[in-house]
Image: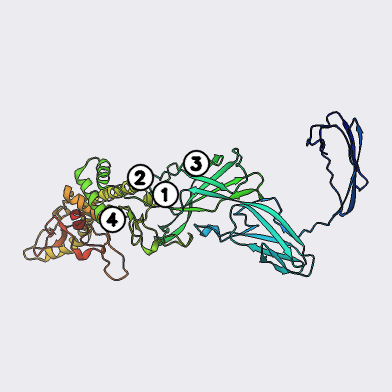
Amino acid sequence: MASVGNTSSCTFSTTADWGDHTTTKQTFPGGQNGTQLALFSHTYSAPGTYTLSVTSVVTGNCYANPATAQFTLLASTKLITSPVGGSVIALTDRDLVQSPPTDKSSAPGPYGLKVDGKLPCKCTLKVNGRPATVTGDTWHVVLPDVKPGPLDIAAVASDGKSQQIQVTLIDLRVVSPADRAGLPLTAAPAMPALNATLQVAGFPGRVPQTVTFSWSLQAYNRRVTKSAKGKVQWQQGPTLLAQGSTVGDSAGWTPKYGTTLLGGWGRLVVKASIPGVTGGTVTSSPRWFDMPGTNPVRSDLTAFIKTHTGNNAAQAAAITGIACKESHYRQFGAKSPAAYKETDIPSNLPNPAANRPLFGPPAGVGIMQLDPAAYPAEQWNWQTNMLDGIALFNQKKAIASGYPGKVKAALDKQRSTVIKTVLPPLNKRRAAHKPVLRPLTPADVPVATVPAFSATQLMQDAIRGYNGYAGKPAKPGGKRPIVHQFTFDAHYATTPGLTVALAGSHSWRPTPPAAFNANPYYVQEVQSCK
């Protein structure tokens, strides 16, 4: 009700009869010209034709015209059953949105919105101009390439019935790091700095700043291992790197890696329960990015070796030579072999990717080509690889240091065998000799003296041990004997004078190259590698 002219001196008592046996009455003062004096509203419960009437009783020098009107309330047409008008839908909602498998795509979409409904006639129907597939009294259609933001959906049947609704589409996105970005492990070594940020595109208004966003970062990579029986095996799959949360859509997330050092393909996902969004928890499409390895600077590597060999120049030189020979000082290869090709990452990513742990058959990994190498530490942390390589060298050095003692023990055992098995028949021959020779006693069998390795020999034999002490078997498929870099030239023999002597030079001599099953020139190549 509005004032025509100045009715400020009057009072109106107005009754609206809605034509459905209900009335509304209001008493209100007048006002200046054009002023809204009162608002009457009513909700009808059923379709039908209704006559409205308005009458007023006026106090004062004013008047109010009575009025009537008639209208027909039609039965509503509900063609669309899903989605519900006014709903907010995430583009990663698998129930309502059609999209490619997000787990295998680093660039998800395009997205299609699934629309379903009922058809109360034997007719056809179009949704936003797109023909729907009709089955009995139901229909469905997928609206292609939908984007974040409001979307009007209009369903029009061929018999003229229609319905229009509006929904809002949102997309929870990882904004940074960028798709397929390169975030290398540093040469320190350390995990890359990652300030992950997000966006809720298309959300109506501002996302409540109390919403908690949960982050999850996994690393996908292929790795070589060995079974308990020593069989080489390749494995792949995700390893959880970090989890955490932020509050509000403007906060960045920095993962807490702890002591983990692991590269490969990073897969980052964020989730949140956003008020008003259909389906509850909203999940982003995965963001894939590369975390390649970075090789250490040569000066840093040599300084590391010196520090962890106790500034022992000879040992540092041996370790440095092994690092040179095995990998040319590289923990990661610029070009990965086919063995690193993965099957559980998106098809549009480089595969195999570059700068993965340097691999050498049968299962050697990294600077020191540890075989097998523990995952992930020895495969992705060059310092751990070096430390464990140095430890392995020290084990071989201890074996080399004890080898002369083993040779001495073996010769002593031979001497005992000679005393027991050789002296009795030899003494019979001496008794039958003309002139008769006195019987030999154990004191007549010389005791072997085996010198320790010199410092140079010790280092060379430890280097040989790093490559393996395996000798060439006497026959194909036979047992491989243990062969060191040096052989002690001595053995017990019967002389023409019917005595027992320790024959040979009684010195360490280089083992003939043909005796080795592995590279016979490994020691020389290590010591000459630059």
Of callouts 3 and 1, which one flags the residue occurring earlier in the amino acid sequence?
A: 3
SS at badge 2: loop
180 lies left or right of 1: left
Amino acid, disc 2: Pro
Q: Is residue 33 above or below residue 115?
A: above
Q: Nearer the viewer, mark 3 or mark 1?
A: 3
Amino acid, disc 1: Leu
SS at badge 1: loop
**Where is mark 2, residue-wise?**
189
Amino acid, disc 3: Gly
SS at badge 4: helix
Q: Nearer the viewer, residue 421 or 50?
A: 50
**Where is mark 1, residue-wise?**
262
Q: CA distance from mark 1 to mark 4?
A: 20 Å
27 lies left or right of 431: right
SS at badge 3: loop
Q: Nearer the viewer, residue 527 or 445?
A: 527
Task: Please say if the residues under marks 2 and 3 sit with CB atoms less than 8 Å apart.
Answer: no
Residue in the image at 19% along x and 46% along y: 314
Q: Position of residue 128 (x, y in %)?
A: 66, 62
Of callouts 2 and 1, which one flags the residue occurring earlier in the amino acid sequence?
A: 2
Of callouts 2 and 4, which one flags the residue occurring earlier in the amino acid sequence?
A: 2
Task: Please say if the residues under marks 2 and 4 sit with CB atoms less than 8 Å apart.
Answer: no
Q: Residues within 10 Å of mark 4 (few under 14, many from 20)?
A: many
Amino acid, disc 4: Ser
Q: Nearer the viewer, residue 78 or 101?
A: 78
**Where is mark 4, residue-wise?**
327
Of callouts 3 and 4, which one flags the residue occurring earlier in the amino acid sequence?
A: 3
